[in-house]
Image (cartoon, helix red, strand yellow):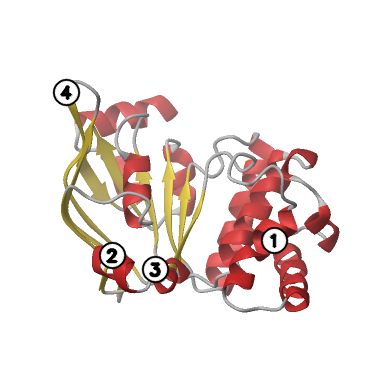
Amino acid sequence: MDEMITVNNVSKNFISRGNSDTLALKGVSFSLEHGETLGIVGESGSGKSTVAKLITGLISPTKGEIRICDNDIQRQKGENPLELYSKIQMVFQNPVESFNPRKTLGYSIGESLRNRGFSASAASTMVAELLEKVGLTAEFATKYPHQVSGGQCQRAAIARALAVEPNILVCDEATSALDVTVQKQIMELLDELRKTRDLSIIFICHNLALVQSFCDRVIVLYDGVIVEQGRPNDIINNPQAEYTKSLVDSIL
């Protein structure tokens, strides 16, 4: 299989005010294969969101290398950022906060299309198609983030991510703010999209049971270090690390 993402010995050090620094990631290495769904689990503060921000280029590593579709992310950022961001898109935990509250959902979804040279009418047509693909009607293009439910807003966020036709989708706790019924609907939508659009997905979540049902492989993060990785069933049925055992015990 082709590697869509390669993370090689990456560390991230956040410099805080005063003398103390925070080492959020410590020598982390993993890969995402083409067509794979990789789960990353761990409690709050384990480094999950730091991984998401690093691989989407929102922050830079202190040490190590990150390659997206075999391109060094740091070098690519300087040369052609639009090409990089067309390969990988992110869906955030809080969908309402991820949108500009003063712009309609349609405007935000169509922004990347207009940046790529689509005319206003062509972008509008594409936005309507994207909304329908994620289970919303075209009328949602005229609504503002605060006028729709959390689940509807997350569907719109997924539509926005799909607008640039990415190869990789990073879901950072994308369902944790939703109730169980809506969560199930979003998971079904993501499952359908990964099959129809040949997406490779990184699914960051604190819910090990959800990861087991959705992911091909899972990484367990604890205090910025990968303590275990493998197939979800293997890890849940036979956890090796003490931290993983505690995660498994919490869902049983």
Q: CA distance from mark 2 to mark 3?
A: 9 Å
Query: In the image shown, does 180 or 200 lie closer to the viewer?
Result: 200
Q: Amino acid at mark 2?
A: Ile
| Residue bearing mark 4 | 20
Query: Which secondary structure lies at badge 1?
Result: loop
Q: Earlier in the sequence, mark 2 or mark 1?
A: 2
Furthest-top residue in view? 18
Q: Amino acid at mark 3?
A: Pro
Q: Amino acid at mark 1?
A: Val
Residue 38 in the image: above or below residue 120: above
Front of the two marks 1 and 4: 4
10 Å neighbourhood of mark 4: few (<14), some, or many (≥20)?
Answer: few
Residue occupying image coordinates x 80% and y 40%: 147
User: Which corner quadrant holds the C terminus?
Assistant: top left
Query: Which secondary structure lies at badge 2?
Result: helix
Residue occupying image coordinates x 48% and y 53%: 214
Q: Earlier in the sequence, mark 1 or mark 4?
A: 4
Q: Earlier in the sequence, mark 2 or mark 3?
A: 2
